[in-house]
Image (cartoon, rainbow, N blue to C red):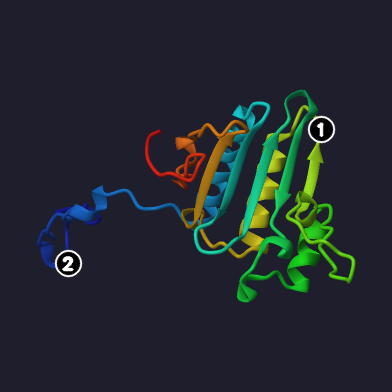
Amino acid sequence: MPAGKAGAQCGGERSPAPRSRLADAIPRQPDTREAWRTFEASLADALGLLEEDEYLVIGSKRRNHYVQFAAQGHHGMWIEAASNAFIDEPADRLSDVQHEHLAALGWDGPQEFAPGPQTVQVASTQGNFFLDAAAPVPVATVARLACTTLHDVYGIPHPGDLEYVAFHRRGDSIRFPTLRLQRQVRAPRGGQEGPQ
């Protein structure tokens, strides 16, 4: 047998043909960086589909860390990232370093509450980090900012650790299956579960 021929071993014996492994036919999950890139592109597509008075909230399954988007039609999009004003669990509250990172990314705010004798504390969008994006909204850049915030600031390791809720101002639920995230189902108005 000529030297260098496939399957030949020293001494002229043929080596066994390589055996295919059954598991090699099963696609593997992409690495974390690729998963975030894929999610970022899907998020940009979803943001481009939001119409006026529609909302999309993407957040951690385990903590009250989220980014939310409110489409304003010809007036752009209001975008928020959770701040300590809406994070109740002490262990989940944002550190000074996380606040600095959010500011370095370009988020505005937040105007968090400083309790005082005359202060009335109410829930307000003023308490979150925010951006008021003009139309046309650069959805790819907004998606990148959201993903960087979720991963780098809030420490969410993988898009599989996220869930979403989307709805119209009237309360109608909206589905975005292309996000490939668990959808959080909101209770219908009136607090009753199930069909009305």
**Label 1 crowd (10 A; few <14 / some 14-19 / many >=20):** some
Q: Which residue type does callout 1 highlight?
A: Ala
Which residue, given by chain and number where applicable, does mark 1 sit on?
134
Q: In this view, does 37 lie above or below 74?
A: below
Q: In the image, residue 18 lies at what x, y percent?
A: 18, 56
Q: Nearer the viewer, residue 178 or 186?
A: 186
Question: Residue at the spot x=66%, y=65% of the render?
Answer: 87
Q: Which of marks 2 and 1 is in front?
A: 1
Q: Residues within 10 Å of mark 2 (few under 14, many from 20)?
A: few
> In which image quadrant can residue 104 be found?
bottom right
- Residue at the image position 52 percent from the left and 39 percent from the top: 189
Tell me the amino acid under the disc marked 2.
Cys
Image quarter in which the C terminus is found:
top left
Q: Which residue lies furthest to the left in this view?
A: 13
Q: Nearer the viewer, residue 69 or 9?
A: 69
The number of numbered discs placed on residues in the rendered structure image is 2
Q: Which residue is painted at 78% across and 56% down in the image?
A: 127
Would you name the residue on which mark 2 appears? Answer: 10
Q: Are marks 2 and 1 in contact (CB under 8 Å)?
A: no
Residue nearest the viewer, comparing 161 with 26: 161
SS for callout 2: helix
The mark that comes first in sequence, 2 or 1, is: 2
Residue 167, horizontal then vertical, whole percent: 56, 36
For residue 57, side relative to residue 79 (left or right): left
User: Residue 23 is drawn in which quadrant?
Assistant: bottom left
Asked if residue 97 shows in the view, the reply is: yes
